[in-house]
Amino acid sequence: MSVVDTIREHVRDHQRGMVVDLVFAIAWVTVVSVVFDVLQGPQWAYYLTLAGGVVAYYGFFWSLEIAREQQKT
C-alpha cells in the first residue's frame, strides 16, 4: 500500500471528524481575530488566545462526549 493510498484511506475513515475539526479551527481563529481587531490587544495575548483554542477544542468535545453518555443512560 502506497503512502497516497494510506492517506486516502485515513481521510475516508475520518472524513466527518476532519471536517468538524476544520470548522472548529476556522471558527476559533475567526472569532479571536475579530475580537483582537476590535480591542487592539497586545500581540502576545492574541497568540496566547489562539493557542488556547487547543484547550477549548478538547474541552468542548470532551464535555460533548460526557453529555452524550449521560443522555444515553
Image (cartoon, rainbow, N blue to C red):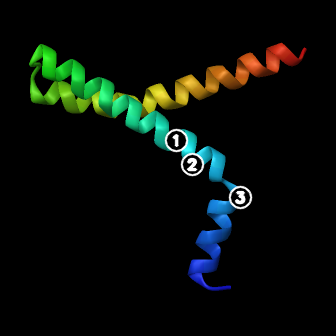
Left or right: where 60 falls relative to 64 = left
- How packed mark 2 is, by other alpha carbons closer than 10 Å (few <14, some 14-19, many 20 or more), is few
Query: Mark 1 belongs to which amino acid?
Result: Asp
SS at mark 2 in the image? helix
Pointer 2 residue: 18
Residue 48 x %, y %: 25, 29
Residue placed at 64% from the left, 53% from the top?
A: 15
Residue placed at 31% from the left, 30% from the top?
A: 30
Left or right: where 1 falls relative to 48 = right
Q: Nearer the viewer, residue 17 or 44?
A: 17
Instruction: In the rendered view, tell whether residue 22 sits above or below residue 32.
Output: below
Residue occupying the far right of the picture: 73
Pointer 3 residue: 13
Q: Quadrant of the N terminus?
A: bottom right
Left or right: where 48 falls relative to 21 = left
Residue placed at 9% from the left, 19% from the top?
A: 40
SS at mark 3 in the image? helix
User: What whole-number distance in Å separates the C-alpha atoms at marks 3 and 2?
Assistant: 10 Å
Instruction: In the rendered view, tell whether residue 5 sits above or below residue 51.
Output: below
Mark closer to the chain start, 3 or 2: 3
Q: Nearer the viewer, residue 71 or 26?
A: 26
Residue occupying the far bottom of the picture: 2
Residues marked 1 and 2 touching at CB (< 8 Å): yes
Q: Which mark is residue 21?
A: 1
Residue 68 x %, y %: 77, 21
Q: Quadrant of the C terminus?
A: top right
Q: Which mark is residue 59?
A: none
Query: Mark 2 belongs to which amino acid?
Result: Met
Residue 41 x %, y %: 11, 19
Mark closer to the chain start, 3 or 1: 3
Instruction: Residue 36: name its quadrant.
Output: top left
User: What whole-number distance in Å separates the C-alpha atoms at marks 3 and 1?
Assistant: 14 Å
